Image (cartoon, rainbow, N blue to C red):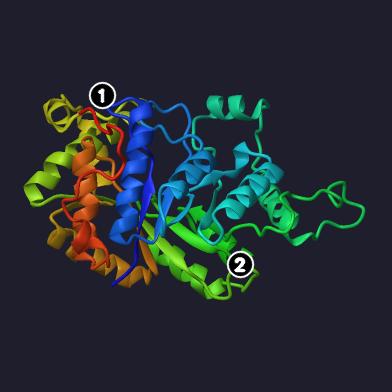
Amino acid sequence: MIPLSVLDLSPVTTATSGAVALRNTLDLAQLADQLGFTRYWLAEHHNARSIASSAPDIMIGQVAAVTQHVRVGSGGVMLPNHAPLMVAERFKVLEALFPGRVDLGIGRAAGTDPVTSNALRRQDVTEDDFLQRFQELVMFETREFPEAHPFHAVHAVPIGVPLPPIWLLGSSGYSADLAATAGAGFSFAHHFAKYDAATAMHAYRRKFCPSQWRDRPYAILAVHVVCAETDAEAERLAATYDLTYARSSRGEYLPLASPEEALAYAYALIDRERIQTNRARMFVGSPATIHSQLLPLVEATQADELMVSSMIYDHGARRRSYELMAERFGLTGAARTNSNPPLYQRPYFEN
């Protein structure tokens, strides 16, 4: 069976604060660790009341500290928001503390709106400088700055600790080409991409150049899944994200609403059209339904791994969604953890 991983945005709901959302992340990470998931990645988003995950490097350390086996990483660090040296040093610290368990996922976008992006950088950046930032990040590790370069004598510390494996995240052909040229792992964001996943992932494999991080291509397919015991229950739970997507399309990033509120919402025609378009990118249903929907996409893309994001209102239902996925896809720890009580001992949900 294909390996499964988790992409967590630490969703905030109308019944859970941002603080509770972050504690829910620790709880879900421990469950994923015992279920046998391969990775647990934390996102970076800003100025969105629906998402508490704004500092993945901090949360990586917290998640790694309460888990034992799962690899923990960023999905991703939005490089336009950060100085490359700072990223290198923070991830070297994480690698030193949790050797062999950290992934450095890099994103090209800002993870927010233009005004918030300017607030993060304290300057008005009108041109895309991602490639320059990425090259600097790599050269702090490879020590390939020319002798006359002002950063030639700058070392990312702690010295002697390698930078974790680099992954490039993307939703386009450009991202696939860049990941291949850099010899990095590639994670394709099917859950919001307009570009064809199979085209991007095949191009990545075809153009891949071996590097110090990876001698062969490895492609992760990130998908949005809402799984429940029955198709009907999964459809009910998915109503939450239907409303979230309709609102975000209008620039409204509000806390996740309950399924009951979402089902009662008075949608405009344009809202329903947008929801229908987004539903084509989602996988909603019972374990058998999800499995039958995902397998053709896995075969078409030749994905090495599936990374699952689930924006579900009730944390208990979100836990159960991942448990059902683990069972259906044959993860090694699924049988012994099914229906166990929460692993993280603080109260973790309020809805």
Along the horizontal axis of the image, is 151 left or right of 306?
right
Residue placed most toward the observer, 351 or 294? 351
**Which residue position holds label 2?**
213
Query: Where is residue 335 drawn, in percent x and y?
Result: 19, 63
**Which residue position holds label 1?**
14
Q: Quadrant of the C terminus?
A: top left
Looking at the rendered structure, the secondary structure element under dot 1 is: loop
Disc nearer the start of the sequence (2/1)? 1
Looking at the rendered structure, the secondary structure element under dot 2 is: loop
Residue placed most toward the observer, 48 or 337? 337
Query: Where is residue 9 drawn, in percent x and y?
Result: 38, 40
| Residue 273 shows in this picture | no
Along the horizontal axis of the image, is 153 left or right of 83?
right
- At a point 51% along the width and 72% down the height, the residue shown is 217
Q: Amino acid at mark 2?
A: Trp
- At a point 10% along the width and 52% down the height, the residue shown is 229
Labelled pair 2, 1 in contact (Cβ < 8 Å): no
Query: Where is residue 33 drawn, in percent x and y?
Result: 35, 56
- At a point 25% along the width and 68% down the height, the residue shown is 295
